[in-house]
Image (cartoon, rainbow, N blue to C red):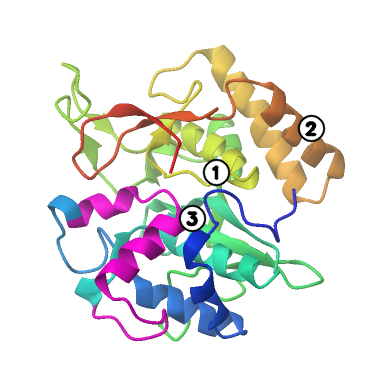
Amino acid sequence: MDYAKQTPYSDPGEHAALFDALPDDIPAIGAVIRNLLIHYRGGGIEFTGDRLAEIDNRWVSAILATDQRRNGTALATPREPVDRVVGCCRDYTLLFVSALRHKGIPARSRIGFAVYFGEGFNYDHVVAEYWNGDRWVLTDAQLDPAGNHPFNTLDMPPGPFVSAAEVWRDARAGRIDPDLYGVQPGLAITGDELNTNQPGLALGGLWFIRTYVHHQLAHLMGDELLLWEAWGTMAPTYTEADAAHTDELAALLIASDNNDETATKELAHRYQTDPTLAPNGRTLLTSPSGRPHEWVNLAQ
């Protein structure tokens, strides 16, 4: 895949000209992205109704359209936090990736878990990678690099962020506790939110990690979907055959990350030929915005 080219999700569309005025250096681009977005749970403001629904902006073009309707100024012009587009880590990353691709820099989103948002728990997270001409550089566009971080957020070392595939592999081998991976400790959705009569479902654990392995693959293949979209066999309940299938995918993803070209080609082949791996134009949207869970068509 050519990561210097926009995907349908990262394409700024009619708002592409807004990226022309962006600075050329990576830290300054990240600062502009943080000026546009506010995290729906971690931004210090409680959003409801139509404002909270902004988290379901699937396309960069839709995120930029929302910003321009509200602010109507150059992207670097300071926005008050309350005027920023409501989103999550996926949106910080995708906007950052979109801006870099606009400048011809190969970039992609990575799905996994971060150890640096709290003690004793690993939070689901999306970060970016870009090609600097020699190697892939991992960076967290959501974090201000001037903050008090124990590592360089612009060039992250191994450890603070772990891919979903690595977490799944280690959980299946019994080396880690899968219940320490998820959205946040103790968070669950109720039967009412699931539109079922079943008890609440913890937003973490082995089933959750498994869905993120499939998201990791989809994002690498250019389907940079919302974190609360599901397709194929992604579900809280699954068979051992499903799990074994995910074992294979995780192994290939890890090998591909280690520059195994054969694994990279095999992943692309499977994504194109296995109908359970790609969304194929339709996903189950289980948004935390409060809208009913429903199957949606992937059309702008």
For the C terminus, the quadrant is top left
Q: Is residue 98 above or below residue 278?
A: below
Question: SS of the residue at dot 2?
Answer: helix
Amino acid at circle 1: Ala
Q: Position of residue 196 (x, y in %)?
A: 19, 18
Identify the residue at image location x=66%, y=31%.
249
**Front position in the image: 86 or 264:** 86
Picture disc at residue 132: none
Please rate how many residues cluster around mark 1, counting C-alpha atoms within 10 Å: few if below 14, some from 14 to 19, many from 20. many
Q: Quadrant of residue 65?
A: bottom left
Identify the residue under disc 2.
266
Amino acid at circle 2: Glu
Give the magenta part as a residue range. Answer: 51-80
Identify the residue at image location x=16%, y=59%.
47
Q: Position of residue 155 (x, y in %)?
A: 62, 74
Q: Quadrant of residue 83?
A: bottom left
Identify the residue under disc 3.
126
Check whether the beta carbons of the residues at disc 2 and disc 3 lie within 8 A of each other. no
**Front position in the image: 283 or 277:** 283
Q: Quadrant of residue 228?
A: top left
Question: SS of the residue at dot 3?
Answer: strand
Q: Nearer the viewer, mark 1 or mark 2?
A: 2
For residue 90: magenta?
no
Amino acid at circle 3: Val
Identify the residue at image location x=26%, y=59%.
40
Please rate how many residues cluster around mark 3, counting C-alpha atoms within 10 Å: few if below 14, some from 14 to 19, many from 20. many
Query: Label 1, label 2: how many angstroms apart (C-alpha)?
Result: 18 Å
Identify the residue at image location x=37%, y=52%.
121
Identify the residue under disc 1.
164
